[in-house]
Amino acid sequence: MRRNCKTSSGVTLVELILAMLLLSVVVLTGLSMEMGLRRLFFASDAESELMGEAAAILTFVSKKISLAPGDIDNSPVVNLTVGGGQLIRYGVRWDSNMNGIVEATDGWEEFYYCINWAGLVNQLWYGRNGTPILMLSDKVVFFRIGNATGEGCDGCSFVTLRLRRDPTNPVNATNPEVTLNTSVQYRAMSIR
């Protein structure tokens, strides 16, 4: 007796199309996950860069304030509007002999938040006695040093700094924004 068995060693067109469709779905899902993870990594990397920059700036500002004898500019927020631009200056008394007493020989340490002034946009500068000497950042969207006698903190100032990767564009996954706050006590206020 002879068996009549038909064996097929080939693949039908329908099977081939289904296999390609399944493979495409698996590959596209993998690529989508990889791109999402890459976007997430990029955003967290940019945010941690901003946090590092903001922490360094706040450390610098805090050190300058903590060495001051407690005298800040009578109007710590001075809006200087020149040519349609805006500059906010914060002055902190510089204690020249480190005795904690305001004296005539003491000068001013200043922080200039340039919103849009004389070609400087979203920048924070440090200076002494009216002369900016060091740019601290060009990613600033908000900077403020509070008055030493207000806001529930006698003898200290609250400092707020907000940085954005690209300050001219809105916040999104690839353009993160970080805000850091701190309070700093003045030298004279800590030894009285």
Image: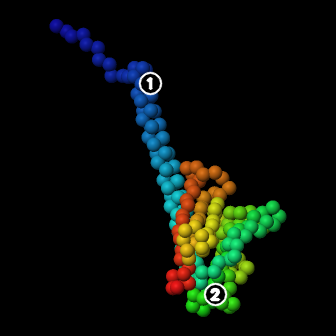
Residue 18 appears in which quarter of the rendering? top left
Give the residue at x 63% y 65%.
143
In the rendered image, is residue 134 in sight?
A: no
Give the residue at x 60% y 51%.
171
In the rendered image, is residue 5 in sight?
A: yes
According to the image, label 2 marks what residue? 102
- Marking on residue 17: 1
**Which kind of residue does numbered mark 1 sit on?**
Ile
Counting from the top left corner in percent of width and height, residue 111 is at 66, 73
Counting from the top left corner in percent of width and height, residue 155 is at 56, 77
Residue 62 appears in which quarter of the rendering? bottom right
Give the residue at x 60% y 61%.
163
Position above or below: 123 against 16: below
117 vs 36, nearest the viewer: 117
Residue 16 appears in which quarter of the rendering? top left
On screen, residue 46 versus residue 123, left or right, reads: left
Query: SS class of the residue under badge 1?
Result: helix
